[in-house]
Amino acid sequence: MCSGNVFIENRADPFVTKGDDGWYYFTASYPMYGKDDKEGYDRIVLRRSKTIEGLATAEEKCIWHVNASDTAFRFIWAPELHKINGDWYFLFAASGSENNVWDIDCHIIKCVGNDPYNDPWTDVGKFGKCEDDDFSFNGFSLDMTYFECNGKHYVAWAQHGGNSNVYLAGVNPHKPWCIVTKPMLLTKPEYDWERVNIPVNEGPAVMINNGGIFLAFSASATGPEYCVGLMYANENADLLDINSWTKLPEPVLTSEDLRGEYGPGHNSFVKDENGEWLFVYHSRNEKCFKGECGFSNEDPLYDPCRSARIRKVKWNEQGMPVL
């Protein structure tokens, strides 16, 4: 596949993972086509293939719909598929009240079986918090991801804490629907490139490589200004100590780095069939940027023109990823 070419059209917040069953899985936000669209942001879709490239043409199935939930309503965003302690889970954001786009919080569903593509799913509900935590998941949280490092299990997510910031907490893998530590503020929009139009940090994604743990996040509003920042730590460090982390003062991917695409962001990382890291992200095309897509007069929330793309991760002499 060629870097920069559209991988899967009109699929924002793309997430790709390889299961221990040998399948690659792809999911993403299922879009609305304008504010009057009666569907969209109302389901979780899934593709699978034995190869990364095969995901582009694989059958896409709706494996879960908000009609199956008593706790989640429309505006399902940024679903991620993770296998935790032997079970498949989807993490995603959804509204807690009907037709309220801003009453969003992190939710979780669990697969009843071992085949996430064909077996049924059950609603676990809104993500839970630990005792004495009066902050987490109180009306604007989203973009949750999960990772394991040195036998410890974590979730990172975006939440409104003055601005949209990224937080990190521990989870119990036996009950991965509730954090077991208070959230740690990992990053907030502090540099100019994180504060264009709207001060935002969101969409955390984790890659562990050669002794380092790298957390990418997206910054600023979702137009051409959208970009990717990076934090890193030693994988043996106490990840719930903010002093273990270093945040780069400059973005690692912006519209200026690309040709014919704009607003790169909200990514995931996955290894290809050769064990090489790939960077899966979304961006808008030039037609959308020029206002020729038919949705440019809409709020960006209802513009479906963000498409999934893939690039290879390269590494510099200091062991840092180059996107």
Image (tube, rainbow, N blue to C red):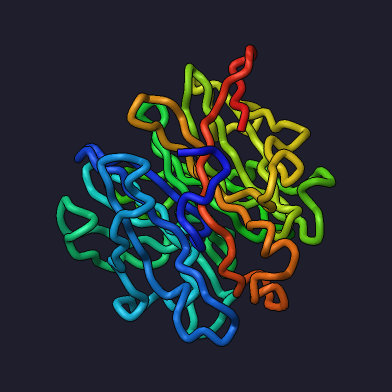
| Residue at (56% x, 81% y) in the render | 100
**In this orientation, does residue 275 appear?**
yes
- The answer to whether residue 246 is above or below residue 82 is above
| Residue at (45% x, 39% y) in the render | 1
Give the left or right position of residue 278, taking residue 62 as reference. right
| Residue at (47% x, 72% y) in the render | 41
Give the left or right position of residue 41, taking residue 228 as reference. left
Q: Residue furthest top?
A: 317
Give the left or right position of residue 218, taking residue 17 as reference. right
Count of residue discs: 0
- Residue 197, image x, y percentages: 81, 61
**In this orientation, does residue 183 appear?**
no
| Residue at (29% x, 65% y) in the render | 61
- The answer to whether residue 188 is above or below residue 102 is above
- Residue 48, image x, y percentages: 28, 51
- The answer to whether residue 82 is above or below residue 248 is below
- Residue 231, image x, y percentages: 64, 33
